[in-house]
Image (cartoon, grey):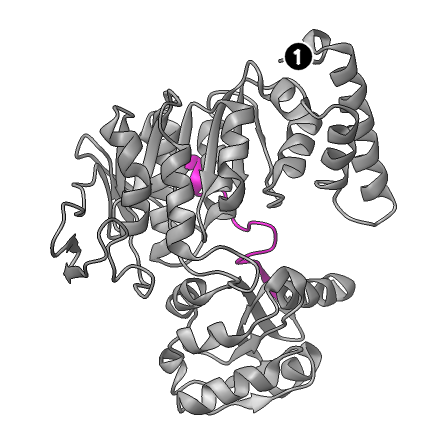
Amino acid sequence: MTDNKLPMRAKLATSISRGAAALSRATGRGDGSVIGGRIGLMIDPNLLAELAAGRQIALISGTNGKTTTTRLTAAAMGVLGPVATNSLGANMPTGHTSALAKAGATPYAVLEVDEHYLKQVLDQTGPKVVALLNLSRDQLDRAKEVAMMAALWRDALPGRGLHLVANADDPMVVWAAGKAVAEGTPVTWVAAGQRFHDDSWVCPECGASIERNGEQWSCVQGNLTRPIPHWTVSGDGVVDNTGTYHHIELQLPGRVNRANAATALAVAAQFGVPPAKGVPELSKVASIAGRYATVVRDGRTIRLLLSKNPAGWLEAFDMAEDVPTLLSINARDPDGLDTSWLYDVDFSPLRGRRVLVTGDRAMDLAVRLEVNEVPFEHVKSFGQALSLVPPGRLEVIANYTAFQDIRAELDRVN
């Protein structure tokens, strides 16, 4: 909907939202992606729905990969015209509202959605496509248990008149989509992979065990089984639903990002983007809110990898090269206050490389590495780590606030 067609109250709320966001950026208090939406919704509680009206919208949700997949999807859909998106990861209704207000009138929007808010955002935006990436444990001190989250999705999705793009390799996602699919919701299955299995050994439908045989999985008693994927990852590219192979030259590392690219292309295809036109756009994406960014400092080439939970850490180990690696852990509110999740991560892939640890909860990480028999060095800061490693490459893997601390330190210097 254009600003001129908005109700007067929504026009006022949109204008003030943009102003608040701009002021936040100008004063260095933040990027404005939350405060703008918060103030706008205070003025007009229906503002998100008003701003969403008239746009074709894709929602991207899951535990991991939301920000990256959203960025890739927006890039692919950009061949059709302007796309509104919350590219910095503000993935709750305040962030969606701010993103749509800032973008103005666009025919399309691609919005990352926190998995807990999916129903609320579905209600307010009426999307054309919803992508379901994965579900795994994440900040259990303040978030829902995985099966509970899957059940909320399962109840929220039917009867929406949308198209699902869902991960065929995650039993929790397949079950969450199952009721909607059984009732006629069309679905595109993507073989997006699942490296972390500890949240999907038990069938959420009947409680029996899930048996795995290579890529295949199925409940040993019930009917829950891996659907036949329409899109797959193959080598350095993807195979689309027509069986056509598309080579992708991503700047983002790891198989997981090729899977994110496959999901992005599958979503964009539902809006009419031919994969052959979307693929070149994906290769232009180099960094997402600092994630995967490479910075050169004092003769060291530093790459930043954000990992927030066990599944994410396993993927980071797959992406990281066999070079000196700094691990940084905090346990502030955005990270979750409980660090016991460290015992859900297998750190053995780090054996044989030089490992340094830092952060507010470095000692928790140190004990965990001792249990996994991974030698390490404790450093008090990122700067000390940099001074100890020789010129060359340094991989940095950090959870949320630790990642932001290191980004801020690099930004101050560079």
For the N terminus, the quadrant is: top right
In depth, the one of 161 and 191 nearer the eye is 161
Q: Answer left or right for 304 relative to 386.
A: left
Query: Can residue 170 be spotted in the picture?
Result: no
Q: Answer left or right for 71 relative to 199.
A: right
The relative height of residue 347 versus residue 31 in the rendered view (above or below) is: below
- The residue lying at 34 percent from left, 48 percent from top is 259
- The residue lying at 46 percent from left, 86 percent from top is 369
Query: Which residue appears farthest toward the front when viewing the image?
Result: 206
In depth, the one of 105 and 336 nearer the eye is 336
Q: Quadrant of residue 103?
A: top right
- Residue bearing mark 1: 2
- The residue lying at 24 percent from left, 35 percent from top is 240
Query: Can residue 154 be spotted in the picture?
Result: yes
Query: Which residue appears farthest toward the top when viewing the image?
Result: 5
Indicate whether residue 119 is drawn in magenta. Answer: no
The relative height of residue 2 versus residue 386 in the rendered view (above or below) is: above
Q: Main secondary structure of the magenta part?
A: loop
For the C terminus, the quadrant is: bottom right
- Callout 1: few (<14), some (14-19), or many (20+) C-alpha neighbours within 10 Å? some
Q: Which residues are magenta?
A: 279-295
